[in-house]
Image (tube, rainbow, N blue to C red):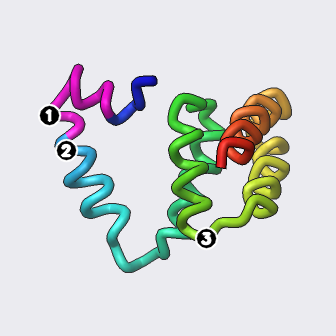
């Protein structure tokens, strides 16, 4: 299966380079927020904006950064009231697949 990162490297290598250098090399490394907090923010944003393609990778990253499954469930519940229940329900299905695969 092609990952979003590998697809980006093949299709838009400069974008992949910029994302690696700026987003993951600079923004994610800034000292103002922990990686755990950045993961919570990113997961919430991806759910709210219905960016489901990016969600599995960031759920895995969030878990690796110390966010618990229970906290991710709370994010889904909270976001449902701001971004809509269908959006949260879609995210829940994707998140369950990630949980089951770990």
Residue 44's place in the image compared with 30, above or below, is above
Seen at 76% across and 40% down, the residue is 96
Please state the horizontal and vertical placement of residue 83, each as a whole percent of the image: 74, 37
Query: Residue pushed farthest bottom?
Result: 31
**Which residue is identified by label 1?**
14
Q: Nearer the viewer, mark 1 or mark 3?
A: 3
How far apart are the two marked residues, 1 and 3, measured between alpha carbons? 31 Å
The mark nearer the N terminus, 3 or 2, is 2
Query: Residue pushed farthest left?
Result: 14
Please state the horizontal and vertical placement of residue 98, each as a whole percent of the image: 66, 42
Q: Nearer the viewer, residue 101 or 81?
A: 101
Task: Tell me which segment is drawn in magenta.
Answer: 6-16
Crowding around mark 2 (Cα neighbors within 10 Å: few <14, some 14 to 19, many 20+) is few
Residue 31's place in the image compared with 1, above or below, is below
Quadrant occupied by the N terminus: top left
Seen at 55% across and 63% down, the residue is 64
Seen at 32% across and 25% down, the residue is 7
Crowding around mark 1 (Cα neighbors within 10 Å: few <14, some 14 to 19, many 20+) is few
Please state the horizontal and vertical placement of residue 5, each as a whole percent of the image: 34, 35
Q: Nearer the viewer, residue 60 or 73?
A: 60
Q: Secondary structure at mark 1?
A: helix
Relative to 25, 42 lies left or right: right
Seen at 23% across and 31% down, the residue is 9
Circle on res. 99: none
Q: Are marks 1 and 3 in contact (CB under 8 Å)?
A: no
Relative to 66, 12 lies left or right: left
**Which residue is identified by label 3?**
66
Residue 98's place in the image compared with 25, above or below, is above
**Which residue is identified by label 2?**
18
The mark nearer the N terminus, 1 or 3, is 1
């Amino acid at each position: 299966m092609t990952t979003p990162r590998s697809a980006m490297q093949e299709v838009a290598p400069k974008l992949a380079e910029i994302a690696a250098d700026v987003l993951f090399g600079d923004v994610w490394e800034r000292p103002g927020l922990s990686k755990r907090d950045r993961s919570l923010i990113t997961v919430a944003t991806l759910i709210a904006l219905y960016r489901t393609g990016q969600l599995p990778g960031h759920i895995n990253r969030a878990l690796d950064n110390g966010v618990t499954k229970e906290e991710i469930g709370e994010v889904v519940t909270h976001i449902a009231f701001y971004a809509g229940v269908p959006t949260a329900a879609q995210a829940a299905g994707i998140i369950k697949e990630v949980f089951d695969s770990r």
